[in-house]
Image (tube, rainbow, N blue to C red):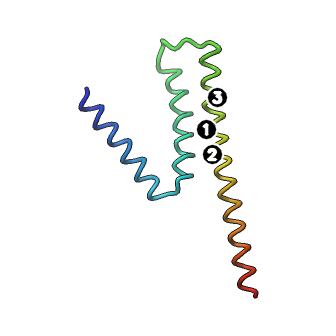
C-alpha cells in the first residue's frame, strides 16, 4: 500500500504539473476548485461515517467559498490585465 501511495502521489503531482504547463495556472486553479467540490459531495454520500454537524458544514462552506472566491478574483485580475494590455497596444499603434 505504501508503494501504491507513492506512485499515486507522483502521478497526481505529475498531472498537476502537466496541466499547468499545457494551460495557465488559473485554469489549474479553477479545475482544482471544481475537483474539490466534486470530492466533497462524493465523499459525503459514499461514506457512512461522516457526522454532519456545524463544524463539518462550516468547514465545507469555508472551503468552497474560499476556493471559489480565489478563482473568481484571479480570473477578473487576469481579465483586467489582458484588457489594459490590449488598450495600451492599440494606442501605440495609432501614434
Q: Position of residue 52 (x, y in %)?
A: 59, 13
Q: Secondary structure at mark 2?
A: helix
Point out which mark residue 67 bears. Answer: 1
Badge 2 local density, few (<14 within 10 Å), some, or many (20+)? Answer: many
56 left or right of 1 in image: right
Q: Residue at x 64, y 28 (%)?
A: 62
Q: In this view of the protein, which residue sits in the foreground, 56 or 43?
A: 56
40 left or right of 7 in image: right
- Classify 20 as above or below 46: below
Q: Secondary structure at mark 1?
A: helix
Whole-Å distance between the Cαs marked 2 and 1? 6 Å
Marks 3 & 1, CB-CB < 8 Å contact: no
Q: Residue at x 52, y 57 (%)?
A: 24
Mark 2 and mark 3 lie on one chain; the one further toward the N terminus is 3
Q: Residue at x 39, y 48 (%)?
A: 15
Whole-Å distance between the Cαs marked 3 and 1? 8 Å
Residue named by callout 3: 62
Residue furthest out toward the bottom: 95
Residue named by callout 2: 71
Badge 3 local density, few (<14 within 10 Å), some, or many (20+)? Answer: few
Task: Locate the N terminus and report the quarter of the image it occupies.
Answer: top left
Badge 1 local density, few (<14 within 10 Å), some, or many (20+)? Answer: some
Marks 2 & 3, CB-CB < 8 Å contact: no
Mark 3 and mark 1 lie on one chain; the one further toward the N terminus is 3
* Image quarter of residue 7: top left
Marks 2 & 1, CB-CB < 8 Å contact: yes
Amino acid at each position: 500500500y505504501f508503494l501504491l501511495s507513492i506512485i499515486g502521489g507522483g502521478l497526481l503531482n505529475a498531472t498537476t504539473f502537466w496541466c499547468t504547463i499545457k494551460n495557465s495556472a488559473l485554469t489549474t486553479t479553477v479545475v482544482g476548485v471544481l475537483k474539490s467540490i466534486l470530492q466533497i459531495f462524493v465523499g459525503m454520500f459514499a461514506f457512512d461515517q461522516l457526522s454532519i454537524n456545524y463544524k463539518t458544514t462550516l468547514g465545507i462552506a469555508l472551503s468552497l467559498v474560499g476556493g471559489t472566491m480565489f478563482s473568481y478574483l484571479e480570473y477578473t485580475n487576469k481579465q483586467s490585465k489582458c484588457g489594459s494590455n490590449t488598450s495600451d497596444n492599440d494606442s501605440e499603434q495609432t501614434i
